[in-house]
Image (cartoon, helix red, strand yellow):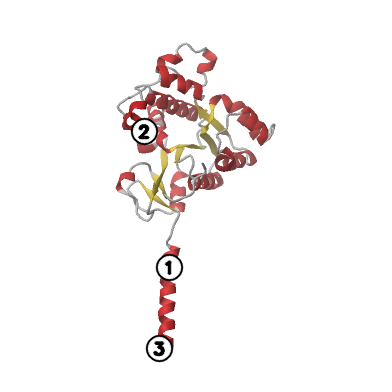
């Protein structure tokens, strides 16, 4: 009897241990919703010209994986980095930091850093500095995006020539019927005017512009941006394809689910690779 109880207890503990081992914080999928290994994703990404890594700004798993992808791609290819978090008029301060001319306190003083910079983005920027990697400030200064949100693209026409160098060349192409832009009007309801998605578009166009301006054949350009800027192959990627259709592009998106062991149908097709994170994951703000 005692032997039987001990055997049963061992089986139960074994089952619980196996269950615990399957509890995952995240899982990677391809566009069809098939689980893929990190190594397979990395191998595929390393063959591209430009990779857009779509993050949730406050998701620690996404930021951790961005750092790991940066390290591992750098080991395979010459690498250039760029990010939405840095606006074009902060390029000088960022470059000074990368060259070792100012420290992190100086960067914080001279650049408009996001409140979660130290926890979420600083590790990648430090890696770029330690390994002499170019890091490009790709985003339009927010004051100009705000001008578009209030007054449309026309609000930028009167800017001095020097200020127009901080954004994509005007006028930019714009398709208000792209699903991502149409959905913004629905998401924000009465708070969104027809100019609201135009502000998103000027950001997308500007990030694409500075990515291509700093792309060099033979180097892989890894860009970090909010997932909405590249989900469903729209946003930044739409502008990249318009200007350079022959380059090799890939995208990564981030999603959250209660159960990460199976990608939900609504998340399939968002990107070439999808980082599925447990929705209970602690956020950084």
Q: Is there a contact, CB below 8 Å, between mark 3 and mark 1?
A: no
Could one spot residue 71 in this view of the protein? Answer: yes
Q: Secondary structure at mark 2?
A: loop
- How far is mark 2 from mark 1, CA to CA? 41 Å
Which residue is more in the foreground, 241 or 226? 226
Q: For residue 72, which numbered disc appears in the image?
A: none
Residue appearing at x 57%, y 34% in the figure? 135
Which residue is more in the foreground, 234 or 25? 25
Q: Residue furthest bottom?
A: 1
> Residue 64, percent across and down?
52, 47
- How far is mark 3 from mark 2, CA to CA? 66 Å
> Residue 244, percent across and down?
41, 29
Count of marks overlaid on the render: 3
> Residue 38, percent across and down?
46, 52
Q: Which residue is mark 2?
A: 234
Asked if residue 123 is positioned above or below residue 7 in the image, the reply reads above
Q: Is there a contact, CB below 8 Å, between mark 2 and mark 1?
A: no
Task: State which tag comes first along the sequence, 2 or 1.
Answer: 1
Q: Which residue is mark 3?
A: 1
| Image quadrant occupied by the N terminus | bottom left
Q: Which residue is mark 1?
A: 18
Quarter of the image where one finds residue 80: top right
Choose mark 3 or mark 2, whichever is in front: 3
Residue appearing at x 52%, y 19% in the figure? 165
Going by the image, does 36 lie left or right of 134? Answer: left
Asked if residue 211 is positioned above or below residue 252 in the image, the reply reads above
């Amino acid at each position: 009897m005692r032997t039987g109880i001990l055997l049963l207890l061992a089986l139960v503990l074994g089952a619980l241990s196996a269950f615990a081992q399957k509890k995952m914080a995240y899982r990677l999928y391809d566009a069809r919703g098939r689980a893929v290994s990190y190594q397979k994703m990395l191998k595929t990404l390393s063959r591209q010209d430009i990779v857009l890594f779509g993050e949730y700004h406050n998701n620690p798993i996404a930021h951790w994986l961005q750092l790991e992808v940066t390290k591992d791609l750098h080991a395979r290819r010459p690498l250039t980095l760029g990010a939405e978090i840095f606006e074009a008029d902060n390029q000088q301060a960022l470059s000074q930091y990368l060259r070792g001319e100012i420290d992190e306190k100086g960067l914080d003083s001279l650049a408009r850093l996001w409140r979660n910079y130290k926890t979420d983005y600083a590790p990648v920027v430090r890696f770029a500095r330690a390994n002499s990697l170019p890091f490009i400030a790709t985003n339009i200064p927010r004051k100009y995006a705000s001008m578009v949100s209030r007054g449309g693209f026309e609000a930028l026409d009167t800017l001095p020539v020097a200020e127009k160098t901080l954004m994509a060349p005007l006028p930019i192409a714009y398709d208000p019927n792209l699903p991502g832009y149409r959905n913004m009007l629905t998401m924000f309801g009465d708070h969104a005017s027809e100019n609201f998605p135009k502000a998103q578009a000027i950001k997308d166009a500007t990030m694409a512009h500075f990515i291509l301006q700093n792309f060099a054949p033979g180097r892989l350009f890894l860009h970090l941006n909010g997932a909405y800027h590249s989900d469903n192959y729209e946003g930044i990627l739409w502008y990249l394809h318009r200007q350079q259709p022959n380059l090799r592009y890939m995208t990564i998106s981030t999603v959250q689910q209660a159960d990460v062991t199976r990608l939900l149908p609504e998340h399939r097709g968002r990107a070439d690779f999808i980082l599925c994170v447990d929705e209970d994951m602690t956020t950084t703000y």
